Amino acid sequence: MTDGKMPLRAKVASSVSRTAAALSRAAGRGDGSVIGGWIGLKIDPDLLAHLASGRAIALVSGTNGKTTTTRLAAAAVGVLGPVATNGFGANMPTGHTSALAKAGQTPYAVLEVDEHYLPKVLVATEPRVVALLNLSRDQLDRAKEVAMMAQMWRTALAEHPAVHVVANSDDPMVVWAAAGSPAVTWFSAGQRWHDDSWVCPECGSPIERQADQWWCTGCSLRRPVPQWVVEDDGVVDPRGAWHKISLQLPGRVNLGNAATALAVAAQFGVRPTDAVTRLSTVASVAGRYAQVVRDGRNIRLLLAKNPASWLEAFDMADEAPTLLSINARDPDGLDTSWLFDVDFSPLRGRQVLITGDRAYDLAVRLEVNGVPFHHVRTFGEAVKLVPPGRLEVIANYTAFQDIRAELDRVL
Ligand SMILES: [Zn+2]
């Protein structure tokens, strides 16, 4: 929709939203994407719908990988023209509103959506494509939410049969949520974390696994044949053509995210051959995977916010000295007993340093896994203790922010 066709209230709300975001940035209060959207929605509750109208939109949701996948998908769709996107993880309606207002008129938008808000954002934006990545518990105290979330997605998608769903065939919860939709493209991005999907969401029977396959022992739910698959260091498309993927982002997990991005972009008519070079331009995502050189150490930051993403971080990290940092403040979840659900043995043989508010919990966990470690009080102390070369830093949410702040101060 052009500004000219927008109702007056929406026009005012959109412009106030942009101004508020700019003011917030100028005042040094973050990038302003939440406050701007919040004010805009106060003036016009339908502002998101007005801003979405006339754009071809893809939504990306799931517990892990959505910020990165959104970034990669926006890069891939960018082959066709300007793409609005919420690149800084402001993934609720206020963030979407602000992102679309700020971008102005673009033919395309790729939006990361918090998994709880997917039904609401489906209604407001009427997307062409929805990508569903995975569902696992975000924090231990929210474990029961996984099945409820799958149910909520399934119900919401049933009300939007025109939406094309791009979904992960390796996650039983995602498959069940998507399976009722008339048009689904399946991709295989792997699932390292199985603890939240041993029970069939359809019938309650156990789910069996063998190699890449999984199936329910009580009903017909089983892994669909994926059309997009990661193979070696590339992705196989639905025609069977293999495309080499050169990413600046580490790990097989990100190859899976790239496959998802290509599958999303294909729904807009982007050929994978045209998109792959654009994927390689993505270097860091909202500070994640950022590499910083300090005192001869090449420091790389990996965010791990829940059990599934800790496993992924071990997979992405090089065999190099590794600093682990854990806090248990509100955004992290107060309970650290999930540490016992994660196998830390992949860290054996590396120089391991630990820090953070809850370093003691981490120490106990590493002790049990037989991983030697060294406790440090500060990030700077860790840098001094490791030899020149790579230092991997794996931290949960607020610990990650602490370390970023410390790096910013020193640099
Ligand atoms: Zn079943």
Image (cartoon, rainbow, N blue to C red):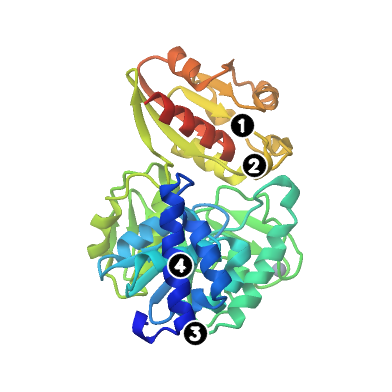
Which corner quadrant holds the C terminus? top left
Instruction: Give amino acid for label 4.
Output: Val
Quarter of the displayed picture in which ligand 1 can be seen: bottom right
The location of residue 313, given as percent across then percent down, is: 50, 39
Cβ–Cβ under 8 Å for marks 3 and 4: no
- Mark before the other along the chain sequence, 4 or 2: 4
Cα–Cα span, label 3 and label 4: 33 Å
Q: Earlier in the sequence, mark 3 or mark 4?
A: 4
Task: Tell me if I can see residue 215 in this picture.
Answer: yes
Badge 3 or badge 2: first in the primary sequence:
3
Q: Name the residue under label 1.
A: 326
- Pick the quarter of the image with the N terminus: bottom left
Q: Which mark is residue 16?
A: 4
Instruction: Please name the residue shown 28% across and 68% down the image.
Output: 82
* Residue contact between numbered discs 2 and 1, judged by CB atoms under 8 Å: yes
Residue shown at 55% from the left, 62% from the top: 92
Measuring from the top left, give residue 360's x and y in whole percent. Answer: 69, 22
